Image: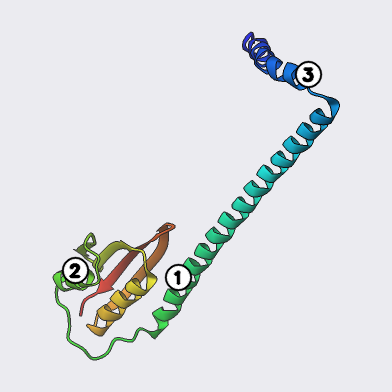
Amino acid sequence: MKTIPHISRSLRMGLSPLHQAFQRLSRRDQLALVILLTFLLLMLLGMGGVSLHQNANHAQKNYDTTMSEVFWLRSQAGNIKPPQAQNITSPEMIKQILTQSGINEAQVTENADGVQLVFQHSQPSVVSNIFNQLTQQGITISQLQIYQATPEQFAVQAVVLLK
């Protein structure tokens, strides 16, 4: 508890020369200095508030854009209709579709339920395009989970059934 009196004493000693200089000024100069310091403090607080408000608006616009893309992607899930197309018989073809879409670090594993896909991408339109291509190849999507891993990335987990 000795640190608080020590800090208080140090602060008083540091501000003492400023206080003495302020006292040597005439009353008119003291008033002008107080008004100027008050104005500068208010301007500083105002600029900080404006900057904070602009950053919040920018973040809200980014969030709204991301959410509208997520809802658009979810709305497109019902429009995916598999045509009478060629059948994919191996997870390697799925990996090829993902690679062509710019996703190089996807996990494609075959299990008893089908083929499990796990990948991340920043654009919902690319994710939608991948699933459109898969359904055009005659693949049935049995499970699909999309969530926002980071503000810039969507994480996708899916189980597809090969025919």
Please name the residue that numbered disc 1 is placed on: 70
Circle number at residue 87: none
Q: Which residue is mark 2?
A: 95
Q: Residue at x 70, y 39 (%)?
A: 41
Residue under the point 64% across and 53% down: 50
Quick check: 39 left or right of 54?
A: right
The quarter in which the C terminus is drawn is bottom left
Q: Earlier in the sequence, mark 3 or mark 1?
A: 3
Q: Amino acid at mark 1?
A: Val
Residue type of the residue flagged with mark 3: Arg
Mark 2 falls on what kind of element?
helix
**Which amino acid, by three-letter code, is at mark 2?**
Lys
Give the SS element for disc 1. helix
Asked if labels 2 and 1 touch by Cβ distance under 8 angstroms, the answer is no
State yes or no: discs 3 and 2 in contact (Cβ < 8 Å): no
Residue 24, numbered label: 3
Q: Earlier in the sequence, mark 3 or mark 2?
A: 3
- Per the model, the C-alpha gap separating discs 3 and 2 is 80 Å
